[in-house]
Amino acid sequence: MELELAGLSEEDNLNMHDGERIILRLTYISRYNTSNANIEVARILEQAQRNNERKGITGVLVINENYFLQSIEGARPIINELLRELVKDDRHFSLQVIECREVEQRRWNKWSMKYLTLGDQDIEYVLKFSAGTDFNPYLMSTSQIMMFIDTLSELQGQREKYAFEMKKS
Ligand SMILES: Cc1cc2nc3c(=O)[nH]c(=O)nc-3n(C[C@H](O)[C@H](O)[C@H](O)COP(=O)(O)O)c2cc1C
């Protein structure tokens, strides 16, 4: 009996590591849980960055006052493990997977978790990619969401570069 159990756990262990070299990118949307008074975006971000660095996860998190939009990439078993944690996390709810695909290369390879906020200056892109004047990712298609994240990330990159150049001169 003992031998059998030992055999099983070894198999489990092997299964856990299956797919380690396969990189998965998972993108989801969720609603910010405003009834949870303790919610603090800074804490979520700090936790994500700390854990992700350790687990080889990279990604981007878009936040506004109602929604989260996150894209995470990493080894397939690790991403699945994080998905289970995310579904259980009551700081957000109504999690909907937008896209989950195997990728050759990481898109967010520089960031353990890049943080993007939606400001007034982004309204043009909100209008361009979403279904109405308000930002509501639940009304957006997968391609609109993916283009939106890409555009927002590019814009923020340009702004950061500009701020850096200004500081230097
Ligand atoms: C919107 C949102 C995004 C999150 N992103 C991550 C993440 O990228 N990585 C991570 O480890 N945890 C993330 N978390 C937290 C997880 O749900 C979970 O609490 C955490 O992984 C538990 O791990 P720990 O207790 O070992 O720190 C996120 C939570 C929320 C609400």
Image: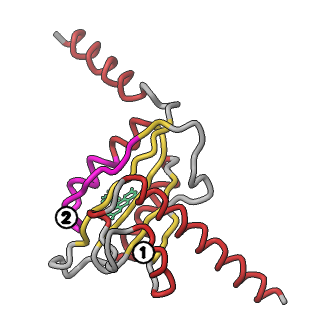
Q: Position of residue 159 (x, y in %)?
A: 64, 79
Q: Position of residue 128 (x, y in %)?
A: 45, 71
Question: Amino acid type of disc 2?
Answer: Asp
Q: Could you tell whether 132 is left or right of 103 in the image? A: left
For disc 1, the marked residue is 126
Pick the quarter of the image with the N terminus.
Answer: top left
Q: Give the image quarter of residue 31.
A: bottom left
As drawn, which residue projects farthest toward the right? 169
157 is higher (above) or lower (below) than 141: below
Q: Residue 87 magenta-drawn? A: yes
**Which one is nearer the viewer's eye here, 135 or 26?**
135
Q: Secondary structure at mark 2?
A: loop
Image color mode = secondary structure
22 is higher (above) or lower (below) than 154: above
**Magenta stretch, residue numbers:** 82-100
For disc 2, the marked residue is 90
Q: Residue 62 magenta-drawn? A: no
Q: Earlier in the sequence, mark 2 or mark 1?
A: 2
Residue 149's disc is none
